[in-house]
Amino acid sequence: MKVTLISPYDDVTAFGVRSLSSFLRENGHDTRVILLPPRHGSPERRSREYDDRVLSDVVSLCEGSGMVGISLMTNYLSHAVKLTEVIRKKLDVPIVWGGIHPTIRPEESLDYADWICVGDGEDPLLEFVNTLEQGGDVSQTPSFWHKSNGEIQRNPLAPLRRELDEFPAPDYSFEDHYVAMGTSVQPLTVEIMSRFLFEASSHRHHGGIDYLTMTGRGCPHCCTYCMNDKMRTLYKGQKFFRWRSVQHLIRELEFAKEKMPFIGGILLSDDTFLGRPVAQIREFCKEYKEKIGLPFFCYCSPITSTEEKLGLMVDAGLTEVHMGVESGSPRIQQVFKREKMGNDCVLEAMKVINKFKDRLLPPGYDFITDVPYQTREDGIDNLKLIAEIPKPYRVKPFSLVMFPGTEIHDMAMMDGFIIDDRSEVYEKDFDDLQHNYLNLLLVLTRGGNFPSWLIKLLIRKPVVAALDSQCMKWLIELSFFSLRQFIRATHLFMRLGKLRHVKAPVAVEAG
Ligand code: SF4
């Protein structure tokens, strides 16, 4: 049976959809993968909607499928709704939604989709497709929910697979893969893939193009704003935090390197790769150095960033790390349930990272702002911590998005901080910081060049009181406006520079 899997995400890596595609193919089904990055080619990225021609191409590509699956996160809901509507209008095919949004908002998702799959999708989806192909009754498929006579039928969750190695690596076959480009959907080739990755700043950590992968599922921590916490609750009593073996991962990277010779680096996008035991890190580093040998990037957490692990990784080619600091305020750390990763722990990890400054690019430190429980004091605490960070560094501030299903979302709902999910959560972009004085300072510290003494001066209480006031609002707005223009001009400049490079992967492919 042909199964069409659609990803509306901006990142054409689409790890989830590619993993499902591999798994279904391994089990004897044909799959077609359609990648629909809505923002591609649009200067006003957020407002980007699919072109009518793209939608009609999608419908044509879904013809003849026994099932259409759409994977979605909350902030892609409107795209999934649109796709579902146009496919349903033209084709009589079951439409299944999977991914994080249907998992946390199943009832709402069933207002649009015929079926939803809750939680990990591989095994339930295979059972659904097998049953459908044999003409059996799919209504009892574990993890699948649907509406029957207006009533929601909620099937129990399928058990989690303990061994991630039992799943194949994501599908990079480039066979029957399509991607939206401009106003049409075209077959995805290695060359087009290189172009997409080249243009995505998230894939450009080493001056070349990065291949992104995930080496595990879950996380040992339980931050109140994170979906991992919700997923762990969903699978209570089961082993939710799982790693792929080093051998499994290296095989994937070897394949990717061979298939896509343009790859210049590897991006390990697990939330905390260094959470692996040191013996595994050692094994990975040895294998990676021998068989892959490309510069690589990983995320780390303050708790697991030890000198021994980082030393091994740097020696194997690690060139950049990102760490979630999230808040410098002990009060907000409590709200986030990150007390174990308090300022002492964070600064200790930063010192360890700084020991490798001659061999690493400046590390990135993430901070979350616009927390409804945050006072001016808490905002000042963020900047106090930043003033203590050993240089070089970069700061990445994010505006808190309280996704449904997270603990902080429920708290904020109860406390009246969220009235309308759609406008205040679903459509919110974590890059859209509130325009206030302390956020402006956060943005100005991004490059890590702001002198610590100046930060300390600018967060003194009388200065903050004067500049964070209503009568200075115009100055703050003007500063944000100027910064935005500057960033746009820089992006445009970089984009023009990048486009000059785009031909390189073509030559590689032809060779
Ligand atoms: S450490 Fe990161 S991935 Fe883990 S729960 Fe916290 S935010 Fe989520």
Image (cartoon, grey):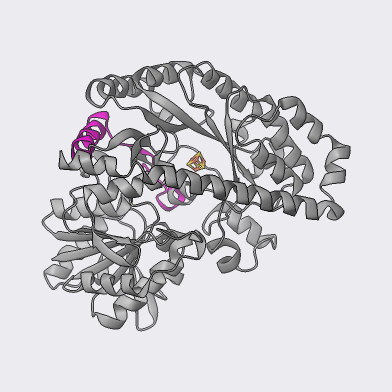
- Picture layout, residue 98 above or below residue 374: below
Horizontal side, residue 46 vs residue 415: left or right = left
| Picture quadrant where residue 269 is located | top left
Q: Position of residue 122 (x, y in %)?
A: 26, 54
Horizontal side, residue 268 vs residue 365: left or right = left
Q: Residue at x 43, y 50 (%)?
A: 231
- Picture layout, residue 213 above or below residue 225: above
Q: Residue at x 38, y 21 (%)?
A: 313
Q: Nearer the viewer, residue 360 or 240?
A: 360
Q: Position of residue 149 (x, y in %)?
A: 35, 84
Q: Nearer the viewer, residue 459 or 233?
A: 459
Q: Residue at x 36, y 77 (%)?
A: 85
- Picture layout, residue 134 above or below residue 275: below
Q: Position of residue 33 (x, y in %)?
A: 24, 59
Q: Let me know if residue 91 appears in the view.
A: yes
Residue 257 among those drawn in magenta: yes
Q: Which residues are magenta?
A: 232-260
Q: Nearer the viewer, residue 366 or 358?
A: 358
Q: Nearer the viewer, residue 378 or 194?
A: 194
Horizontal side, residue 395 vs residue 49: left or right = right
Residue 100 among those drawn in magenta: no
Horizontal side, residue 179 vs residue 436: left or right = left
